[in-house]
Amino acid sequence: ERLETLRIQSDIEGVIVKADTLGSLEALEKEMRERDIPIRRADIGDVLRRDVIEATAVSEDEPLLALIFAFNVDVLPHAREEAERRGIKIIQDKVIYRLIEEYDEWVEKEKERIQSERLEGLIRPGKFVIKRGYIFRRSNPAIVGVDVLGGILKPGFPVMRKDGERVGTIREIQEEQKTLPEATAGDELAVSLKGPVVGRQVKGGDVLYVDVPRDHMISLKKDLSDLLPGDELSVMEEIIQIKQKKDPTYGVL
């Protein structure tokens, strides 16, 4: 009877807990409750393949809860293989506090990884100046020498003038005939721009900015600003000021 009352089975998004005895399970459950870690299922016995499959169901909505605590139990070979294949974390130890320590470390690393992946998919603040006398091609695409003044530039990023008018898109970044995936503050290199004609929409000496879309700016400000270097944060504020001249709600959380 006590076995049934201590087992937890629910549909909530939470971790899977496996332990060797009822006492261990009770102690783990208490520790989880004190730390506000939701439990999807707590049970006695070794980690099985079905435990991994159940943890996978959590990973889509709550990746930081998609793991299995294994206290003083074995992880069966099929379960280990399935966990590696599905990317499910199994924390295994014979000491409760070490389980929790490893969990805390894993959560921090996962948060950083998830944030980095989100950041990678966003158009980010950048600022550069077209160097006078370094106009290599006027159009289709325009190819110019630039100094990156702050933030980051990547192929595909839209660019605008200081008046907020979008003038084109970064097509390619090159340094000494080598194509680069990005450029950051202090870099001096060549950039090809799809859209503008040098001498019309842009000219030597012009300062251009990345035209960060509204939803990307909100994501950056709300969730990811801690990951941005100081120069990029400064450029972000400049972009917000430029955009707010036409749209006062731009960049407002």
Image (cartoon, helix red, strand yellow):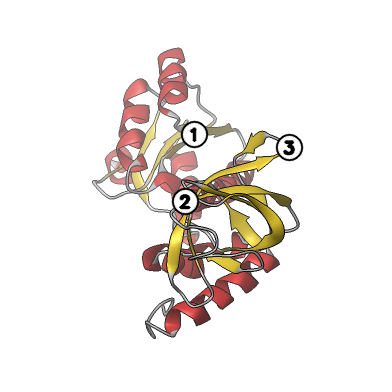
In the rendered image, the quadrant that contains the N terminus is top left
Determine which residue is flagged by label 1. 89
- Residue shown at 45% from the left, 17% from the top: 81
For the residues marked 2 and 3, what is the alpha-carbon distance in whole angstroms? 31 Å
Q: Which of marks 2 and 3 is nearer the N terminus?
A: 2
Determine which residue is flagged by label 2. 118
Looking at the rendered structure, the secondary structure element under dot 2 is helix
For the residues marked 3 and 1, what is the alpha-carbon distance in whole angstroms? 44 Å
Quarter location, residue 106: top right
Residue kind at label 2, given as amino acid type: Arg
Return the x and y of residue 27 as percentages of the image width and height. Answer: 49, 48
Position of 184 compared to 42: left or right? right
Residue kind at label 1, given as amino acid type: Lys
Q: Relative to 121, does residue 20 appear above or below in the rendering?
A: above
For disc 3, the neighbor class at 10 Å (few under 14, some 14 to 19, many from 20) is few
Q: Which of marks 3 and 1 is nearer the N terminus?
A: 1
In the rendered image, the quadrant that contains the C terminus is bottom left
Residue kind at label 3, given as amino acid type: Glu
* Mark drawn on residue 178: none
Q: Is residue 46 visible?
A: no
Return the x and y of residue 144 as percentages of the image width and height. Answer: 62, 52
For disc 2, the neighbor class at 10 Å (few under 14, some 14 to 19, many from 20) is some
Asked if the residues shown at circle 2 and circle 3 are in contact, with their CB atoms under 8 angstroms apart, the answer is no
Determine which residue is flagged by label 3. 176
Which of 173/22 is in front? Answer: 173
Looking at the rendered structure, the secondary structure element under dot 3 is loop
For disc 1, the neighbor class at 10 Å (few under 14, some 14 to 19, many from 20) is many
Q: Which of marks 2 and 1 is nearer the N terminus?
A: 1
Position of 91 compared to 133: left or right? left
Please tell me how many numbered marks the rendered image carries: 3
Asked if the residues shown at circle 3 and circle 1 are in contact, with their CB atoms under 8 angstroms apart, the answer is no
